[in-house]
Amino acid sequence: MSNPPELTMMAVPGIPEIGPGDDVASIILTALKQANLSLQANDVLVIAHKIISKAEGRQINLNDVIAGEKAIDIAAKSEKDPRLVELILRESVAISRMKPGLLIVRHRLGFTSANAGIDRSNVFQHSEGESVLLLPEDPDLSALKIRATIMVETGNEIGIVIADSHGRPFRLGTVGVAIGVAGLPALLDRRGEPDRYDYELQHTEVGTADEIASAAGLLMGQAAEGTPVVLLRGLNLPKVQGKATDLVRPKEMDLYR
């Protein structure tokens, strides 16, 4: 009898507060070394987007934002800060739903989320005004760069998932989702494979990167845990170079748009 599949996860300790210009890949490698953790082939590192955004200078002081007429109008209807709404509009391509206290938009990266993923939790606040954090400019590219640096330093083929937390239609609670992917399949197509009774799968496409991000979220947490990097070991994934944009449902297939 073969051994059952096994997956282990561990939060990487010792990740410091990240600032603009910091090298996230080098910081992760240093933290792994200090924790006596060595990367192995096929390991996956899940990284909270906030440390990527901070390193890429995506923290914005609302005092530096001038709201336009459209943002002011939408802010009145949604009961939000016009400056925040201005940033949301800059980061999005369409408004999906709006009511007092809530603004759901289609992000320029393709997914739909509240406030275009802009958040102030776990963002250091200076005395001169409220700061918020935008998503990375190109999370797939950020993942590729981090993976390349780590592979050069370690010699191991690994996967990278940059994770965010999104709400879901029809269900309460946020879950981890992948907004950046490198070195693994974001969407795993299993159509044509047989099941246990030789039925050929017809529609089975697995959101692998989202499943990984959601699993890692159990260790990352949402508040003051301070564990923005999680190491997963034991995944046996095909050698497919996916990207997070693979997960975006095409417009012509979206019955809920």
Image (spheres, rainbow, N blue to C red):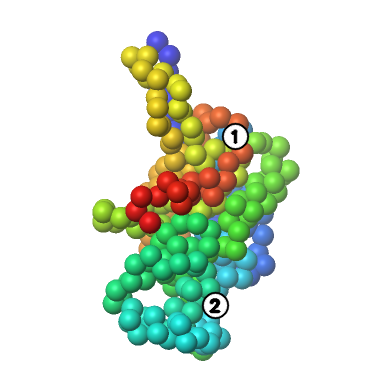
Residue beneath the point at 33% across and 81% down: 77
Where residue 158 sits, quadrant-wise, is: top right
In depth, the one of 54 and 225 nearer the eye is 54
Residue 8, compared with residue 99, is above or below; it is above
Q: Nearer the viewer, mark 2 or mark 1?
A: 1
Quadrant including the C terminus: bottom left
Label 2 crowd bin: few (<14), some (14–19), many (20+), radius 10 Å: some
Q: Give how far across and how far down residue 155 sits, in percent.
A: 71, 37
Q: Position of residue 244 (x, y in %)?
A: 53, 48
Q: Is residue 98 above or below residue 225?
A: below
Residue, disc 1: 240
Specify the amino acid type for callout 1.
Val
Where is residue 79 shown, x and y percent of the image?
Answer: 33, 82
Residue drawn at the location 34% of the way across and 58% of the way down: 167
Left or right of 218 on screen, residue 159: right
Residue 105 in sight in this render: yes
- Where residue 157 appears, as percent x and y from the top left, is 65, 36
Total numbered circles: 2
Q: Which residue is mark 2?
A: 60
Residue at 59% from the left image edge and 34% from the top image edge: 240
What is the crowding at mark 1: few (fewer than 14 residues within 10 Å), some, or many (at least 20)? few
Q: Quadrant of the N terminus?
A: top left
Q: Give SS at disc 1.
A: loop
Q: Say what amino acid the circle numbered 2 marks.
A: Ile
Front-most of residues 154 and 51: 51
